[in-house]
Amino acid sequence: MIKIWITLIFSFILCVYPAYGAEVGMPQLNPEFWPAQIFWLVLIFSGLYIIIWKVFLPKVTNSIENRKSKIVNDLDMAEKLKENAEKKLKEYNQIIENSKKEATKLIESAKIKLDKDIEINKKKINEEIEKELFSAEKEIINLKKISVSNINKIAQEISSELLKKIIGSEVNMSSVSAAVEDISKKNIIKYL
């Protein structure tokens, strides 16, 4: 409001009084008009100084202070964000390191478990193989015994048929079987 009144007063003064010394020539050089010029000079520059000092300078100062505080706040925020980012990076690196350690532990435990499982399965398979070998050996021994008796029967039959063809008469089966048994007992030790 004060600005408006000051502006109106200056406008009124300028309109009412005509320019001093305009008829004579250059009034700036005429010492008679110097006090009026000094008055107006002081009045105008004082008014400009007051206007600048009270109106524009506070706005500029306020703007500079706002910018300064905003810059300081932004720098503080940037520093906080930087610290937060560094903290998060450390946490992330720690998580990665822990994950690597945990993965290594899991791999080691899985390897140990797998080795144990392989060893257990290997033992089971070896036991089964031993059982199969033992049963196969039993079968072979049984087959040898059965085959010896079968060989004896076959040998008795073939011997009796050969003797029958050679002699031309029936042979006593008990004597042929005794002879075959005697020969097979002597030679069976080689094959068992």
Image (cartoon, rainbow, N blue to C red):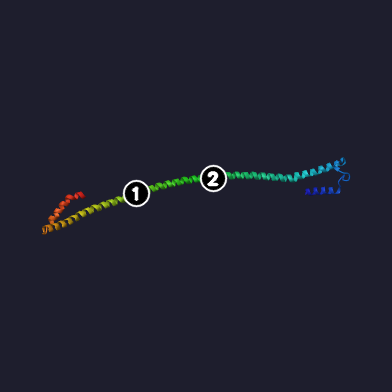
Three-letter amino acid code of the residue under disc 2 = Leu
Which residue is pictured at 17% across the width and 51% down the height?
185
| One can see residue 27 in this view | yes
Task: Rate crowding at label 2 as few (under 14), some (14 to 19) or many (20 or more) other CA atoms within 10 Å.
Answer: few
Asked if the residues shown at circle 1 and circle 2 are in contact, with their CB atoms under 8 angstroms apart, the answer is no
- The circle drawn on residue 175 is none
Q: Residue furthest right?
A: 24
Name the side, left or right, on which 168 lies relative to 109: left
Where residue 6 sits in the image (x, y, percent)?
Answer: 80, 47
Q: Image quarter for residue 85? A: top right
The residue to which callout 1 is attached is 122
Q: Nearer the viewer, residue 17 or 148?
A: 148
- The circle drawn on residue 89 is 2
Three-letter amino acid code of the residue under disc 1 = Lys
Q: Residue furthest top?
A: 31
Q: Secondary structure at mark 1?
A: helix
Which residue is pictured at 67% across the width and 45% down the height?
67
Q: Residue furthest bottom?
A: 169
Q: Secondary structure at mark 2?
A: helix
- Marks 1/2: CA–CA distance: 48 Å
Which residue is pictured at 84% across the width and 48% down the height?
14
Where residue 157 sits in the image (x, y, percent)?
Answer: 16, 57
